[in-house]
Image: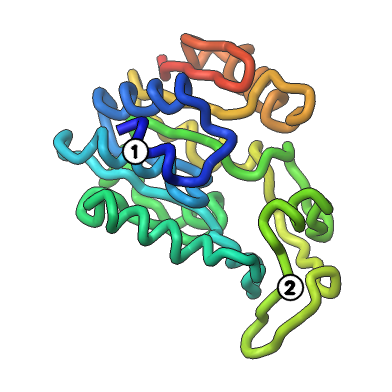
Amino acid sequence: IWERAQEIESPHLPKEHGKILFEISQRTPGNCVEIGSWMGRSTALIGSAVRNSGVRLYSIDHWNQIAGGIVKTDKDIWKSWNQTVVDWGLERFVVPLRGLSHEIASGWNFKRHSIGFLFIDGLHSYLETSPLRFPEEWKKEYGMTGWKIGGREVPLDDYAPIFPRGAKLDYDAWAGNIVSGGYLIMHDVNRPEHPGCSKVWREDVVDSKLWTVIIDGDGFGMARKN
């Protein structure tokens, strides 16, 4: 499964991390939720793990649909993700939820759809509401060319929506609703280039009595809900 998953673009998910995602998903005591799906490598791994377990994977991502507009890139990320799900035969086991995680959580029935495993790999800032500006490296890496808002084409730098976002929002909206004995994994923690993720991990997980930390590594944190 891992070797096949290499065909899906995701330079930031190494083999050892993917292996843990797969193994934890197989023994989750409830449904799985991933915040940040992008092209679908983590989706394929977790979805493959739950297909025989009786639970589902709920994949949350904006897939370039942000604050009333769609960021145009040289690849259709939303189309690519859906094609990954079809290619892996996971349509009955994976449910896409397109939007911001805290907004989706506000309408979630946690009693009916219990969460046994949460994987947070969304926006890596801590908490911000400033105008959205894309770093130059993102523009180049993803081939960002502009916005599509309604029927209008808008230059990339001419639209800077303001909305709340960050790893703290993802954590606050979902992690407290993980069932006892369930798992939380946060990606890109303990790395100086991602201080937002590291701050959430350290303050809300490592320093909290709510969790038993299992892995506190370079780029990867895993804990079990007490």
Nearer the observer: mark 1 or 2; the answer is: 1
Image mark for residue 4: 1
Q: Residues within 10 Å of mark 2 (few under 14, many from 20)?
A: some
Determine the residue positioned at 36% across, 48% down: 58
Look at label 2 and name its amino acid: Gly
Task: Answer left or right for 187 relative to 127.
Answer: left
Identify the mark at residue 85; answer none if there is no mark.
none
Q: Residue at x 80, y 76 (%)?
A: 155
Q: Tell how many labels.
A: 2
Residue 172 in view of the camera: no
- Residue 194 is left or right of residue 117, and the answer is right
Viewer-side residue, 205 vs 27? 27
Label 1 – label 2 distance at C-alpha = 32 Å
Q: Position of residue 145 (x, y in %)?
A: 73, 70
Q: Which residue is mark 2?
A: 146
The image quadrant where one finds the N terminus is top left
Left or right, 8 with respect to 48, comes to right
